[in-house]
Image (cartoon, rainbow, N blue to C red):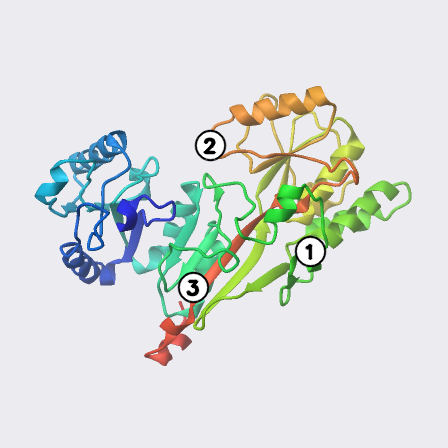
């Protein structure tokens, strides 16, 4: 949280501590902060230098004073005399009662501390996800079940287990976030070149991916749509379903190289709610097939027309907007003429919150690029941290 004056994109912003250990950890952390050397970053002995400019410094100091005014406990390092000149902000700890106290990213040497009770971990994860930010997340535990449960639920592009959460290495920890922290693809990941070249749906095997153990089945709603499409008269949809089944990345993963004592795994998750915008029924069904093949939730405009006889599994998966309703979605699938596409892009650009990528079909194949309908996640595990008391490995969460 204090390296590079807290100005790294993946720097620690909130430290969540279980009540049982919070007091001891904070005492050690505050003592360690007292050893930090603050000053000119040109000197090798310096740990913390200035922030980028005076505007950043003023904003950080105003935030600290606001939190102090709200009654939050604030602990700060003392600035040395040489830091009186320059844009220095003292390394600061701020105890907060809720993540709701933070209304945006605090980009500097400020770490917020949130204490939680043993039974509140799920609520903490939900609150983190609700913040909308999803770049890096770290968890420290020697209980495998706890690590697996949290890693599965957290919506962050890079998850670090029992190690620091900065310093991603290209090809080892492909880097990138989701939500307010990015739209993908990951820098240094298998999809980066695919995206830059505008390739639609290369075979997963060609990307160095392998089938995830136990991950052969695609989402049930897609399977139901595929079965329904096999009926006479739906040949175009059936062909689309076959193509999307072959291209979906949901059941694939990559085991990435790394140093001894560390594992790195890349896998794919649904992007979330996907708005489907098309001018006719056939185009809309194509969009449903693409969205469902990646496990997403299709969102339809109030006037969108679909066959009445859609399978129950598909119909139950859809969200339909009320007339005049808008909704923050993870992506937009768009089909139509140039005028319609331009209007959809303007609407998405004007929406608040996270960026909404507007995704069109490949002009050659007519298919949507499924890699843009997934999010990439990397879990990096320091396996050497499990040493010591090996009986801890058998504990349940």
Query: Of the residues under marks 1 and 3, which one precedes in the sequence?
Result: 3
Label 2: element kind: loop
Give the residue at x 31% y 60%: 118
Image side of residue 159 versus residue 327, left or right: left
Helix, strand or loop at label 3? It is helix
Task: Point out the tag, 2 or 3, that comes first from the N-terminus.
Answer: 3
Figure check: 304 above or below 393: above
Give coordinates of residue 165: x percent, y percent.
38, 56
Horizontal arrangement in the rendering, residue 321 relative to residue 86 (left or right): right
Q: Look at the numbered disc 1 and give the secondary structure of its residue.
A: loop
Q: Nearer the viewer, residue 308 or 363?
A: 363
Q: Residue at x 42, y 71 (%)?
A: 383
* Residue nearer the viewer, 73 or 264: 264
Q: Position of residue 192 (x, y in %)?
A: 59, 48
The reply to whether discs 2 and 1 touch (Cβ–Cβ < 8 Å) is: no
- Label 1, residues with CA under 10 Å away: few <14, some 14-19, many ≥20: some
Compute the Cα span from label 2 to label 3.
29 Å
CA–CA distance in space, label 1 to label 3: 25 Å
**Circle nearer the viewer, 2 or 1:** 2
Q: Is residue 316 visible?
A: no
Marks 2 and 3 close (CB-CB < 8 Å): no
Q: CA distance from mark 2 to mark 1?
A: 30 Å
Say if 146 sits above or below 46 in the image. below
Q: Which residue is mark 2?
A: 353
Residue 361 rendering spot, x and y as whole percentages: 72, 36
Query: What residue occupies the far right of the structure in this picture?
Result: 232
| Horizontal side of residue 103 vs 30, given as left or right | right
Image quadrant assignment for residue 232: top right
- From the image, tell me which residue sits under label 3: 147
Query: How would you rate the neighbour count of disc 2 (Cα within 10 Å): few for under 14, some for 14-19, many for 20 or more?
Result: few
Please give the label number shown on residue 218: 1
């Amino acid at each position: 949280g204090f390296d590079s004056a807290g100005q790294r994109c993946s720097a620690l912003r909130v430290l969540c501590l279980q009540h049982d250990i919070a007091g001891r950890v904070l005492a050690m952390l505050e003592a360690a902060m007292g050893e930090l050397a603050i000053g000119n970053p040109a000197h090798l002995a310096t740990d913390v230098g200035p922030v980028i400019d005076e505007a950043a410094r003023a904003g950080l100091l105003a935030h600290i004073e606001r939190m102090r005014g709200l009654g939050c406990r604030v602990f700060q390092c003392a600035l040395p005399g040489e830091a009186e000149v320059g844009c220095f902000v003292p390394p600061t700890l701020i105890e907060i009662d809720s993540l709701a106290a933070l209304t945006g990213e605090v980009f500097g040497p400020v770490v917020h501390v949130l204490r939680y009770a043993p039974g509140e971990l799920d609520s903490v994860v939900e609150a983190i996800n609700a913040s909308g930010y999803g770049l890096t997340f770290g968890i420290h535990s020697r209980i495998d079940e706890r690590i697996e449960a949290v890693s599965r639920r957290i919506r962050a592009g890079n998850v670090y287990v029992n190690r620091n959460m900065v310093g991603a290495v290209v090809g080892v920890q492909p880097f990138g976030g989701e939500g307010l922290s990015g739209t993908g693809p990951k820098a240094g990941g298998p999809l980066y070149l695919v995206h830059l070249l505008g390739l639609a749906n290369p075979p997963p095997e060609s990307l160095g991916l392998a089938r995830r153990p136990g991950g052969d089945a695609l989402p049930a709603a897609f399977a139901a749509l595929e079965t329904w499409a096999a009926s006479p008269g739906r040949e175009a949809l059936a062909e689309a379903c076959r193509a999307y089944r072959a291209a979906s990345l949901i059941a694939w993963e990559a085991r990435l190289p790394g140093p001894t004592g560390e594992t790195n795994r890349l896998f794919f998750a649904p992007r979330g709610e996907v708005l489907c915008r098309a001018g006719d029924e056939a185009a809309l069904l194509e969009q449903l097939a693409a969205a469902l093949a990646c496990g997403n939730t299709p969102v339809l405009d109030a006037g969108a027309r679909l066959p009445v006889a859609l399978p129950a599994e598909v119909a139950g998966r859809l969200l339909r907007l009320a007339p005049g309703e808008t909704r923050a979605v993870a992506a937009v699938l768009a089909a139509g003429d140039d005028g319609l596409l331009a209007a959809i892009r303007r609407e998405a650009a004007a929406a608040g919150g996270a960026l909404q990528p507007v995704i069109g079909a490949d002009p050659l194949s007519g298919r949507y690029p499924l890699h843009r309908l997934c999010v990439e996640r990397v879990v990096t595990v320091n396996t050497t941290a499990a040493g010591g008391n090996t009986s801890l490995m058998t504990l349940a969460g």
